[in-house]
Structures are given as C-alpha cells and as structure tokens.
C-alpha cells in the first residue's frame, strides 16, 4: 500500500479519518514495521505536545499542598527577588511529581496489595479536596457599600515617576480615558492613592503601583488597593505588567489568588464573581481558593475560576485589548545593544525576525562621516547598559545634513509580519533640538531604499512656530490628549535634548491600520488608529523601520537608539 | 527468573522500570484510545497489573516489551468488556504492529516536555493559539478554524506547519542538550 502522507497521520491523531480511511490506515500499519515505527514516533510526539501544553502543577499533589511554592510557603518572603529561581524550582518539582507519586504508590502497593490502587488518585483535579468556599464576607469581598473602607489621599498633581512611594501611597493614577466615576469616587490624573477602593462605571484607568507594577482597569470596575504589591478585583477587566524587579504582585479575585512571576497578564471578574485569567507573557501562579489547586500558567495559557474557587485550565483567547493598550507604553522592551553589536545583527538576530544589520548613512559624507558605535556613557534607560549612538558629519550651516538608520525585518517561525505586531524602542535626540529641522521614525513595507518608496506609517517631530526654536512631536488634531503622565501639560510633547522617548508602534496589517504611543519621563501620548499607506499590488516580503534626523546646521547631528524589539501581540 | 514483589530490592527495581516506561506506555494508550479519561484508567490498570505480575518478569529481558504487552491486553480487554463505550481506533494486526514498534522505540524522554515548552514559546501567537486549542482544549481543526475566524483548511495547514516547526525545534533541542537553538 502506498505510504500515507503526513496529512493522513495528522488526520488520524485529529480523529478525522472516516471508517473506510481508518481501515486502509490499519492495513498500511500492519504492512511494515517501518510504518508502525513511523506511527509510534508520531504518537510519542503528539503525547509530548499534550504534556507540554498542560499547566505545570506547582504545589498540589493529590490535594495536599506542598509548602515549596505558595505565598504561605518558605519562599514567600523573597518572592520578588528570587522569582526566576522559584520558577525553575517549581518546574523541576513539577517534572518529578508524577515520578515521585508513582514510585511511592508502587512501593506502597507492592506491600499493601493491589486493592489500594483503586483509591490512588488519577489526577490532582480528580481527587483534590474541594473545600467549600468560605463566604466572601469573610474575605472582605462584600464591601460594596459606597465609600466603605475608602481612604484615598489627595496628593499634589505634578509628580514625576521618581516621586512615587510616599509612606501611605500604594499607587498613582497615571492615565484616564473616558472614565465615568461613580458619585464620590472621582480621581484625578496624577492623584496618589492610599489603600482603598477604586470604583467607576466606564472607561479605563491606568495606575502604577509603588511596587512597580503597571496596571489598567476597564469599567464597570471595582478594585480594592491593598498595598503597593497587592490588590483585589471585585469586578471589571484588569491587565498588569510586572517589569523586572516587580515580580510577586498579587491580585485576589473572589475565587482565586493570582501571583505575578514577572509577566503581562489579564484577569476579569464578571457579575457572578467568576474569574477569567489569560497570561500574555511570562508566567503567573494561580491558586484556586475552593479546591486549593495551585498551578503555574505561562504565556498563552489561561483558566476560568468559578466564584466558589474551582479552577478549570483552558486556553483563553480573551484579547484584553483595551487594558493592554493602556499599559503598552510602560513595558520595558528587551534585547538591548551589547558590546560589538553595531556591526552585527543586534539587537535581535534572524530568529527574532531581523533580516540584516543596521544600515546607517549620513549625508554629506566626509572624512568624518558616520560614526555608529555602541556606547555606555549615558544609558537611555536604567537597566540597559549600552545603546547605539549615531553621529553625522559636521555640516557647514548651509546645506542640509541628514542622518539615517534603517533595518529590515520579516517573518520567521517566531514572528510574522502578516499578523499584528509591535515595535518598541527607546530613542534619544542627542543634538540640541534647535539645530534639527526634523526627526522622524517611519515604517516601510518592502525595502525603503527601493523606488523612493513612501512610508506606510510615520511619526514626525518637526519645527513648530509655537515651540520657538524647538521641535515637537506632531499629532493629529483628532487624537486624544488624555493619555499623559501626571500633572504635566498634555500637549507639549517637546523633543528635548537628551530626553529619552519610549516609542511603541502597533502595526495591524490584516486590518490595514497602525497606531503609536510616545512616552518620556514627563509626557506621553497615544494616537488613534490610522490607515496604513500601502502600495497597492506590491508584493511585500519584508518590512523596514527607519530613523532619520535632518537639519541645516554647522553642528553634528546625533541620536541614539536602544532596545529595539519587534514581536507579535497575542 | 521470577521475582517476589515483597523484596525491597525488587520493589526498587520495579519502581525504576515503571518510571522509565510510563511515558511510553501512556503515549501508546493515548494513540489508540481517544477518551483521555478512559486512557487514564487504562494506564492505571496497566500499573496495577505490573505490580501484580512483576514476579513473572524476567529481569534478563528488556522491560518495555513486557510492559507493552500488558498495556496492550489492558486496552483490548477493556474494548471487549464495554463494547463500543471505549473507542479503540486500532485492533488486530495493526495494533500488534504498533505495540512492537513502541516496544522497539527508546523510552520516551520526559525532559523533552520542558524543551517543547520552550519551542511552543517560539511559535507565532496565532499558531500557538491553534496548538493550544488542539492540544490544550482537545478541539478538532474545524472548531479551531471557527474560533479563529479562518477556513478549516487554513487551520489544518497552520497546525501542520506549527507541528513541523515544533518537531524541528525539538530535534535541535535534543542535539543541543535540551535547549532549543
């Protein structure tokens, strides 16, 4: 019999072969040991993928809680500082769990007799202790009376990020979008919040906890702020991002305790008290209050937890788009520049989607032409040690000097330009902005060098008469100005000398749209979705990002780029 | 030849044998039995029979073929007992050939699961979604396609490509000692 295509094997394991096809398949299997070996190999692969997809069991072994991992265990005190170690330990523990249980059971069985086998549990879920859910009142979940437990402090509005962390402060409002507060619950942008309740009917509120976690809540919502690293979600949709160092943040819901192990995750609580959890990046530990199950959930995984605290792991697809957008500008990006990376494919190699090294051009080109170097003199961001510094030749004050850095990227296994993706980076204009005419970041679909192609998206900082001798980011009049850091003018967006800007561009090729977020330590701004300027009918094999500075100056032009990251957003 | 299961040394040997063989036995049962709960029951029954009959095992022979025979009988007995209730997809010669093939394979290395988890992280979000729905939720391609808003064929192709990428990633990880390259 002819060997079946891989497709037939796939269809067998998808349980999609008809009775007739199955019969033929059985004949093929019996025909040759090689056929059966191919089947066995495929079956083992299928089994491994299923195993790999199962949430890792953190601490529960047949209902008994091992003290290794939980917040009440010996690791609780140093959760934040040892999250990575802990995850490793938990993963190793999980890998051995089945072996240990089996070995112990076998030892007991061999002595005590086969009848005990029937009482040996099959899975932790099947046999774990389903404790009756304690009344939410005992947990403080019923404080729905207006103003109950509120103790919000009203702090000065003009606060920079460095001033977080007063003695009573647990969080600060850093963004408001279309918020309808319930009477008596109004909060202002920049307001410092002590432990208490945040309640609103609609809109999005972004807060930064003193522990470092950035979170956003979409209404109707009720969030109890308990500490700088602890909150309780009674209702609403919540997304959080824990940058390095802020691991250990805990979110309680009626049925679950969610501990952030360094991640971006979303959780929502409906009117019945049921919780949906989705992990977008990194991992979280979830404890179901009812059955006591503790599991580690990683990127792409999720669970539903009933109000009674019974967990059901599943693959959730809730996008949490709105709250995630609200925190996207705060996310620290990865893959910073490293030593010797100016000429190599860095940051990020071909496996991350980058198709080649940076192409850096300055005009006019002189003997002192472009200098591109990786330096660590003044880091753009704490935690990043080096960045790419670009320096043009000196101009004569008459001719236009231009400095250009661009890099192509395309689809690989881990990244696709056909799906929505983001570009995140840090940029700093190092020239005195008064000598600049224009600074722009642009995206091209297809190589930009070809055919003087127009950009598909473009963020421009240009000279503005109102800004005097400075340049500032240009914005569409229709864009909202509500996304701003606390206490600062909402529409300045001035490009300052040496001021680092975090740029986040979201490109959505399937829907032919894009948007961006700009954030400096003192200002921020998110654009509305805009249409991509696509070249009709053009075959697009790669995209390209380009940074360009230009000015009529007798000085050098210089800017720096750090932590450029492209990735698909789930 | 035969061994008494009451001996501590024998118990230890039996534990080691079973621990190594269990993933392969589980993969075998899952390849023939669709219902995960039924497959779980059958794995339990196999373990029970291993304990009961370990005295008949000849330690001079490989353990895996011996335990695979037990697993096969457990599956066939179950299929006979409850008729169509437990759906066993392959019987007769085909199933015998599969048993022999599993017995000849090296024991499944459970550490590959950790490598595969890393490989899963390398898939595009949409491909990872599809794989998650297929293996996490046990959905068929048609339902996955409806959920992801694509044609059934597109979902099948996406799953096929994702699995191919995972296979390649796992192979390189195996060569590199567990770390995907």
Image (cartoon, grey):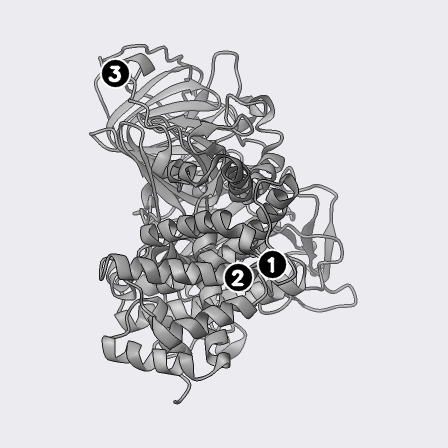
Where, quadrant-wise, is the C terminus of chain B in this rendering?
bottom right
Kindly check if marks 1 and 2 are in contact, taking CB atoms under 8 A apart as contact: yes
- In front here: A81 or B133? B133
Q: Earlier in the sequence, mark 1 or mark 2?
A: 1
Which element carries disc 3, helix, strand or loop? loop
Q: Position of residue A540 (x, y in %)?
A: 43, 75
In the figure, is residue A372 to the left or right of A474? right
Kindly check if marks 1 and 3 are in contact, taking CB atoms under 8 A apart as contact: no
Q: Compared with residue A103, is residue A406 higher up or lower down, i.e. above or below?
A: below
What residue sits 44% from the left and 47% below the top? B48
The chain letter for the residue carrying disc 1 is B
Residue A481 seen by the camera = no
Which element carries disc 2, helix, strand or loop? helix
What residue sits 40% from the left and 15% below the top? A195
- Nearest to the eye among marks 1 and 3: give it: 1
Q: How many marks?
A: 3
Q: Residue A142 carries which label?
A: 3
Category of crowding for the residue at label 1, using alpha-carbon neighbours closer than 10 angstroms: few (below 14), some (14–19), many (at least 20): few
Category of crowding for the residue at label 2, using alpha-carbon neighbours closer than 10 angstroms: few (below 14), some (14–19), many (at least 20): some
Residue tagged 1: B58
Residue tagged 2: B66
Q: Compared with residue B69, is residue A132 higher up or lower down, i.e. above or below?
A: above
């Amino acid at each position: 019999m002819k060997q079946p295509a891989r497709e037939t094997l796939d269809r067998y394991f998808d349980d999609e072969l008809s009775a007739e096809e199955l019969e033929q398949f059985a004949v093929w299997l019996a025909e040759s040991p090689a056929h059966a070996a191919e089947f066995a190999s495929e079956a083992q692969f299928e089994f491994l993928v299923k195993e790999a997809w199962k949430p890792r069991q953190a601490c529960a072994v047949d209902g008994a809680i091992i003290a290794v991992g939980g917040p009440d265990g010996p690791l609780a005190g140093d959760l934040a500082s040892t999250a990575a170690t802990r995850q490793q330990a938990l993963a190793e523990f999980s890998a051995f769990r089945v072996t240990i249980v089996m070995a112990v059971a076998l030892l007991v069985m061999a002595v005590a007799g086969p009848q005990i086998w029937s009482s040996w549990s099959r899975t932790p879920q099947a046999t774990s202790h389903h404790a009756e859910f304690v009344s939410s009142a005992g947990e403080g979940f019923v404080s729905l009376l207006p103003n109950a437990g509120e103790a919000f402090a009203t702090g000065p509005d003009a606060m920079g990020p460095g001033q977080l962390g007063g003695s009573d402060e647990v969080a600060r409002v850093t963004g408001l979008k279309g918020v309808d507060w319930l009477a008596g619950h109004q909060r202002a942008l920049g307001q410092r919040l002590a432990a208490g309740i945040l309640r609103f009917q609609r809109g999005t509120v972004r807060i930064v906890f003193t522990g470092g976690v950035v979170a956003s809540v979409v209404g109707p919502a009720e969030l109890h702020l308990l500490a700088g690293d602890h909150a309780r979600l009674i209702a609403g949709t919540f997304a959080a991002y824990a940058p390095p160092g802020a691991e250990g943040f805990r979110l309680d819901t009626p049925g679950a305790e969610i501990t952030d192990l360094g991640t971006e995750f979303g959780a929502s609580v409906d009117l019945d008290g049921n919780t949906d959890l989705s992990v977008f990046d990194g991992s979280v530990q979830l404890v179901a209050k009812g059955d006591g199950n503790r599991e580690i959930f990683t990127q792409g995984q999720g669970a539903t937890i009933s109000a009674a605290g019974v967990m059901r792991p599943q693959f959730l697809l809730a996008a949490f788009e709105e709250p995630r957008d609200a925190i996207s500008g705060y996310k620290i990006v990865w893959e910073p520049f490293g030593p010797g990376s100016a000429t190599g494919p860095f940051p990020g190699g071909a496996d991350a989607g980058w198709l080649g090294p940076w192409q850096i051009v300055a005009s006019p080109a002189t003997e002192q032409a472009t200098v591109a170097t990786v330096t660590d003199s003044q880091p753009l961001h704490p935690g990043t040690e080096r960045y790419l510094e670009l320096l043009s030749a000196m101009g004569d004050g008459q001719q236009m000097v231009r400095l250009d850095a661009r890099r192509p990227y395309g689809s690989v296994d881990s990244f696709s330009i056909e799906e929505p993706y983001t570009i995140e980076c840090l940029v700093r204009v190092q020239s005195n902005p008064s000598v600049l005419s224009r600074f722009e970041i642009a995206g091209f679909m297809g190589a930009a060098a070809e055919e003087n192609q127009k950009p598909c998206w473009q963020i421009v900082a240009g000279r503005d008469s109102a800004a005097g001798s400075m340049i500032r980011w240009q914005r569409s009049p229709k864009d909202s100005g509500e996304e701003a850091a606390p206490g600062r003018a909402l529409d300045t967006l001035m490009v300052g000398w040496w001021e680092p800007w975090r740029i986040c561009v979201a490109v959505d090729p399937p829907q032919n749209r894009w948007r961006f977020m700009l954030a400096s330590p003192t200002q921020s701004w998110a654009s509305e979705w805009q249409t991509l300027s696509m070249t009709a009918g053009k075959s697009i094999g790669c995209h390209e990002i380009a940074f360009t500075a230009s000015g009529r100056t007798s000085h050098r032009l210089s800017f720096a780029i750090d932590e450029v990251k492209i990735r698909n957003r789930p | 030849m035969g061994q008494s299961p009451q001996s501590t040394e024998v118990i230890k040997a039996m534990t080691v044998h079973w621990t190594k063989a269990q993933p392969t036995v589980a993969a075998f049962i899952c390849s023939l039995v669709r219902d995960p709960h039924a497959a779980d029951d059958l794995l339990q029954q196999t373990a029970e029979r291993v304990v009961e009959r370990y005295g008949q095992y000849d330690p001079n022979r490989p353990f895996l073929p011996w335990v695979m025979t037990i697993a096969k009988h457990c599956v066939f007995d179950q299929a006979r007992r409850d008729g169509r209730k437990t759906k066993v997809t392959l019987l007769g010669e085909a199933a015998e050939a599969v048993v022999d093939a599993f017995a000849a394979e090296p024991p499944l290395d459970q550490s590959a699961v950790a490598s595969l988890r890393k490989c899963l992280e390398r898939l595009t979000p949409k491909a990872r979604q599809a794989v998650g729905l297929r293996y996490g939720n046990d959905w068929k391609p048609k339902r996955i396609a409806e959920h992801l808003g694509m044609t059934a064929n597109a979902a099948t192709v996406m799953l096929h490509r994702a699995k191919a990428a995972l296979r390649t990633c796992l192979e390189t990880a195996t060569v590199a000692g567990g770390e995907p390259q």
